[in-house]
Image (cartoon, rainbow, N blue to C red):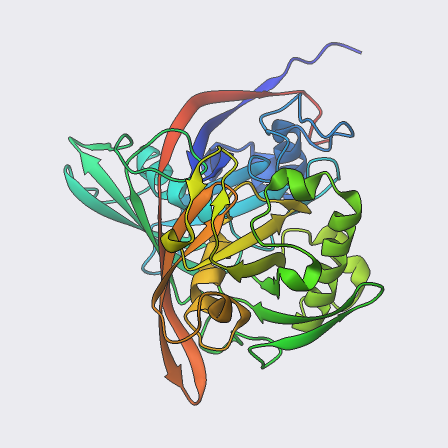
């Protein structure tokens, strides 16, 4: 058989918040990948370097963590009032699947700059702030991404710092508009707090919410933790990870996201599982001391069955919304009462999030949730893909 060389696909490698991913203009994908989702997934998997039995993604663009095993597709939007469509693809590291059931809030901050860079946004100002109107196609929600422009270019460098990212950059504000449609259930069970029975593990108080991303919150002390744990405390403990997965699956069933536990095997991106605790002094993963007075509460969350090194952006939205609703476990951990913003501690430091809520017919309506991130292009050009990848 004659040798077939690799083919090229135009791509941009970007950091957004505390995540990294390979970005593609949908129009630049091979035609067969645009028309066939199975071939598209095979292409994205091979580019990222999955599935990899060694869990290293040595032969691809992925970084062997849930924060870096990501592919992002962006194209012109046909949805009225929006500039671009944004598809988020969470690529499993060692398993053969691509999860598109949710969003990445961190990388949402990079979608705006990427869209401008690709010429997908009309009427971009020479100077000032450009609001990129993003249609998050996975979950069918609107995200407003506020990007600073200077002399006709995206201003990437600035002095805004994020815990979990070593270098400062320009601040990008994000607004998640109606992260839960008023017709949808913010609390799928109808309760702010439920007793979640987990077979073989126990019964726990849990707040289950759909804002940002479906998330199951439990109290840290109920599962044997302080709430100040770092990645090494959790990710090296296989028994603990198995317990967390059982809690996550039980939450998914209770929330109606799945009807059979086996479905969770191909739906690992959602729901998230997180544990909360009151504010307390702690030492971050970088060795920085953070005082209890600098935050309202602690939150630790798992993504793709691993404790996240900071916090997922979508989970930050869930935290912000839940914290602003009196009676949830998140609100109670933050001291209770009415709130519109909270600062929570995570393994790399702390972050401030907020939410605007109203009530209608006795139910909470989330008008928007907000947070700030930063983003920059690390590399652009072509990724080389082995021939036959999509066969």
Where residue 21 sits in the image (x, y, percent)?
51, 34
223 vs 79, left or right, is right
Location of the N terminus by quadrant is top right
Q: Residue placed at 51% from the left, 43% from the top?
A: 310
* Residue sitting at the far bottom: 361
372, 156: nearer the viewer: 372
- Please identify the quarter of the rendering in which residue 365 is found: bottom left
333 vs 238, left or right, is left
Where residue 146 sits in the image (x, y, percent)?
28, 48
Q: Residue placed at 37% from the left, 52% from the top?
A: 294
239, 302: nearer the viewer: 239
152, 330: nearer the viewer: 330
* Residue sitting at the far top: 2
The relative height of residue 370 versus residue 351 in the rendered view (above or below) is below
Q: Is residue 236 visible?
A: yes
Q: Is residue 77 visible?
A: no
389, 284: nearer the viewer: 284
Q: Residue placed at 58% from the left, 80% from the top?
A: 191
Where residue 359 sits in the image (x, y, percent)?
38, 83
- Please identify the quarter of the rendering in which residue 223 is found: bottom right
* Residue sitting at the far right: 200
Where residue 92 sits in the image (x, y, percent)?
68, 40
Location of the C terminus by quadrant is top right
């Amino acid at each position: 058989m004659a040798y077939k060389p690799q083919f090229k696909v135009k791509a941009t490698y970007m950091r957004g918040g505390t995540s990294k991913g390979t970005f593609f203009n949908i129009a630049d994908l091979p035609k067969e990948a645009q028309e066939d989702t199975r071939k598209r997934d095979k292409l994205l998997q091979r580019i990222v370097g999955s599935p990899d039995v060694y869990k290293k993604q040595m032969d691809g663009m992925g970084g062997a963590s849930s924060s870096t095993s990501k592919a992002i597709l962006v194209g012109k939007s046909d949805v009225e009032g929006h500039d671009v469509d944004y598809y988020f693809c969470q690529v499993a590291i060692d398993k053969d699947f691509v999860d598109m059931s949710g969003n990445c809030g961190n990388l949402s901050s990079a979608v705006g700059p990427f869209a401008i860079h690709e010429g997908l946004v009309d009427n971009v100002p020479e100077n000032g702030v450009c609001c990129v109107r993003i249609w998050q196609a996975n979950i069918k929600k609107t995200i407003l991404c506020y990007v600073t422009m200077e002399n006709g270019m995206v201003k990437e460098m600035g002095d805004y710092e994020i815990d979990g990212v070593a270098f400062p950059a320009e601040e990008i504000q994000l607004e998640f508009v109606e992260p839960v449609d008023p017709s949808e259930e913010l609390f799928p069970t109808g309760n702010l707090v439920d007793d979640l029975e987990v077979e073989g593990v126990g019964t726990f108080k849990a707040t289950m919410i759909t804002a940002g991303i479906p998330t199951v919150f439990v109290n840290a002390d109920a599962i044997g933790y302080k709430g100040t744990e770092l990645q090494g405390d959790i990710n090296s403990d296989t028994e603990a990870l198995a317990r967390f997965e059982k809690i996550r699956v039980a939450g998914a069933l209770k929330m109606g996201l799945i009807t059979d536990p086996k479905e969770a095997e191909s739906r690992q991106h959602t729901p998230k599982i997180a544990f909360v605790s009151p504010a307390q002094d702690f030492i971050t993963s970088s060795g920085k001391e953070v005082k209890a007075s600098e935050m309202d509460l602690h939150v630790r969350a798992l993504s793709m069955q691993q404790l996240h090194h900071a916090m997922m952006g979508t989970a930050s939205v869930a935290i912000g919304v839940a914290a602003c609703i009196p009676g949830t476990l998140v609100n109670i951990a933050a001291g209770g009462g009415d709130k519109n913003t909270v600062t929570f501690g995570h393994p790399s430091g702390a972050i401030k999030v907020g939410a605007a809520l109203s009530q209608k017919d006795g139910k909470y309506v989330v008008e928007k949730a907000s947070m700030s991130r930063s983003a920059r292009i690390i590399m652009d050009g072509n990724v080389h893909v082995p021939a036959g990848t999509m066969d």
